[in-house]
Image: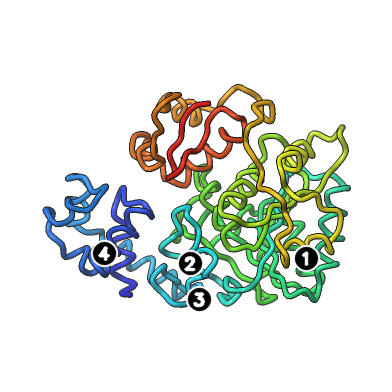
Amino acid sequence: MNLEALLQLANVEDIGTRLLTRLVNHFGSPEEVLGASVAALERVDGISARRAAAIHGGTNSQIVEQQLNAIARYGVKIITLWDDDYPSRLRQVDYDPPPILYVRGKAELLQTDALSIVGTRSFSPYGETVVREIVEALAGSGLTIVSGLASGIDGLAHAAALACGLPTLAVFGCGVERIYPPSNAELGRRILESDGAFVSEFPFGTEPTRGNFPRRNRIIAGLSLGTLVVEAGEKSGALITALIAADIGREVMAVPGSVHNLKSRGCHALIRNGAALIENAEQVLTILKSGTTSRTPSTEQAELLEPEMPEDEKRIWNLLTYGDGLHVDSIADSLHFSVAEVLGNLLMMELKGIVRQMPGKYFVRT
């Protein structure tokens, strides 16, 4: 795979990851895509005349040169969907597997057996203790701990892994040249110094904007055998990771908490709907080895989240009907969202019980 040509194609305006993959698969290589005529490009599903013209016009070569220089400067390995060493579990994900992965650190960790641990940013002493005890008890298990390096449970999971000698992998919602949030800069440096790794689908210079995190969450879930949620409120982004994990057939586990703790309501909702209740590391290992979760979380309880919808969900809701389903690609194209961003919102809407997924990634109101 010609990296320079692939980066040039990836930097064409309005070409998302799904279209990028479709184009390379259709023409056989990024060089062939860039050399194709406008007419040939328009024959590819999803390529409008405007997009075809943009591809045919090419990308500012200075942008690609800056990307290549940054790759060399930070010692980043590029793994593409067409490479043999692309992580096999992530390749199986039906949520638009990222065609380009930027890996800073030990890239081999992407192929290891992994457990993702996610949760609230504002954890309690109970949540901190649970994360530390479970991760420490997993020492020697051979698992890699995956999370998003966010403040809170994510950072605690990475730190606990480092403390007991487990490898750890941080998935970013921005470029891998920066450590986000800045409050975890020292933790990020320790991860790299301990043969850990950062991974992102976002090129250098990408800011950690709100829409990037649902996309990041699908990578966290996709790299892992299962996802463990420790303290998550009703609107926690950790629930998106858990629901994606369930939807792609991975194990979903949650730690119960006090009924008086608002940070436990998301975990309790997952458990009510089929996630495995976890009290210790032995239960985690048993589930990962034997797949004993009886059912994946259902999303039919409207009371799990407040009925008031954020603006992005309202825009999606207004497109849907109670009858004919609308495909996720059509929603993304209509709203100019990425497919992953649409899926993140739809998963939260499913959790509320206000939409339902039909076969083939079609969605309807309930």
Q: Which residue is mark 1?
A: 285
Q: Which residue is mark 3?
A: 75
**Inter-mark Cα distance, 3 to 4:** 21 Å
The label on residue 355 is none
Which mark lies nearer to you, 1 or 4?
A: 1
What amino acid type should be assigned to the residue bearing mark 3? Gly
Circle 1 residues within 10 Å: few <14, some 14–19, many ≥20: some
Q: Quadrant of residue 186?
A: bottom right
At horizontal 66% and vertical 52% (from top left) the residue drawn is 150
- The answer to whether 96 is drawn above or below residue 70 in the figure is above
Q: Which residue is mark 2?
A: 102
Residue 282: x %, y % from top left = 84, 64
**Disc 3 and disc 2 in contact, CB within 8 angstroms:** no
Q: Quadrant of the N terminus?
A: bottom left
- The answer to whether 82 is drawn above or below residue 116 in the figure is below
Which mark lies nearer to you, 1 or 2?
A: 1
The label on residue 61 is 4
Q: What colour scheme governs how the chains and residues are painted in the rendered image of this protein?
A: rainbow
